[in-house]
């Protein structure tokens, strides 16, 4: 069963084969369908979605602060507005969500983001190497980053350029995974972030990518 949410997203609840970081069995999941964006993404139900405007986040923070049990989550949303990267993400991505409760061992959110970039021409599999190189070079431009050479993988949603690597973030290091999926005149970017120490065991990212659909 699905219901509508603000922003045009339809939400469906299910239990699917989302594998946790530790390789555990199936866990409850939620599917978000963006009709305007033309995609559907399935993530763990416990993950917290990020509204697409600062005003909506502020309203959510005010609501969460009314209960002691949700004060930490209110602070998590407040930290998004407090950072330049967090504010930029509100316009750069059409969907974002993060794992909650957050691990106490790191300030880095375990996060998924979806971006849609429009092209003046229809994109094909032949464009993948150039697309992958552009994104990989941009990530490698961060001082101290270690980005692997992109490779083409096949997902149910189509062929994609896959990029994985690490980027320093103060005293911690971000682990990043990107799937770049061309479809017509749109390029879908499925981006993941996690503390780099957990990147190798983040099997959940693969599950989310396998369940990602272009509608």
Image (cartoon, rainbow, N blue to C red):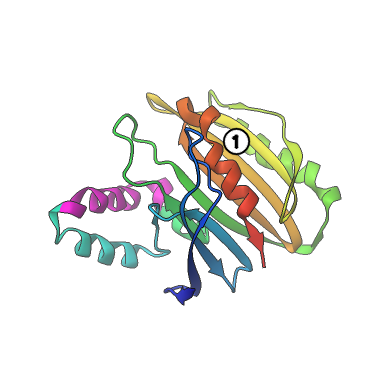
Depicted 144 relative to depicted 20: above or below: above
The residue that appears at 13% across and 53% down in the rendered structure is 68
Q: Quadrant of residue 213?
A: bottom right
At horizontal 38% and vertical 52% (from top left) the residue drawn is 46
Residue 161 is inside the magenta segment:
no
Q: Determine whether the residue tagged by mark 1 lies in a helix, strand or loop.
A: helix
Crowd class of label 1 (few under 14; some 14 to 19; many from 20; radius 10 Å): some
For residue 121, which quarter of the picture? bottom right
Q: Which of 153 and 42 is in front in this view?
A: 42
Residue 206 shown left or right of residue 92 in the figure: right
What residue range appears in magenta?
69-86
Residue drawn at x 26%, y 67% as measured from the top left: 59
The answer to if 82 sits in the magenta stretch is yes
Q: Is residue 131 above or below residue 157?
A: above
Position of residue 215 in the picture relative to residue 87 (left or right): right
Up-down relation of residue 187 to residue 167 (above or below): below
Quadrant where the C terminus is found in the figure: bottom right
Residue bearing mark 1: 139
Q: In the image, what residue occupies the spot 39% across and 65% down?
A: 53
* Residue toward you, 189 or 15: 15
Pinpoint residue 129: horizontal percent, then vertical percent: 80, 41
- Residue furthest toward the front? 25
Magenta span: helix, strand or loop, mainly?
helix
Image quadrant where residue 60 sits = bottom left
Q: In this view, does 35 lie to the left or right of 112?
A: right
| Residue 206, image x, y percentages | 60, 42
The percent position of residue 211, horizontal first and vertical second, equals 62, 54
């Amino acid at each position: 069963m699905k219901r509508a949410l603000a922003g045009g997203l339809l939400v469906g609840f299910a239990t699917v084969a989302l594998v946790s970081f530790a390789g555990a069995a199936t866990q409850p999941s939620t599917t978000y369908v963006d009709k305007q964006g033309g995609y559907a993404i399935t993530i763990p139900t416990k993950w917290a979605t990020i509204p697409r405007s600062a005003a909506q986040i502020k309203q959510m923070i005010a609501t969460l602060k009314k209960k002691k049990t949700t004060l930490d989550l209110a602070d998590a949303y407040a930290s998004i507005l407090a950072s330049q990267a967090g504010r930029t993400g509100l316009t750069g991505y059409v969907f974002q969500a993060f794992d909650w409760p957050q691990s106490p061992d790191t300030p880095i959110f375990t996060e998924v983001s979806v971006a849609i970039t429009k092209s003046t021409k229809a994109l094909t599999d032949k464009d993948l190497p150039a697309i992958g190189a552009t994104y990989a070079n941009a990530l490698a431009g961060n001082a101290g980053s270690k980005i692997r050479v992109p490779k083409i993988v096949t997902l149910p949603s189509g062929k994609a350029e896959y990029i994985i690597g690490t980027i320093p973030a103060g005293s911690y290091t971000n682990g990043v995974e990107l799937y770049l999926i061309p479809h017509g005149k749109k390029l879908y970017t499925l981006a993941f972030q996690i503390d780099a120490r957990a990147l190798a065991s983040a099997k959940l990212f693969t599950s989310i990518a396998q369940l990602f659909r272009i509608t």
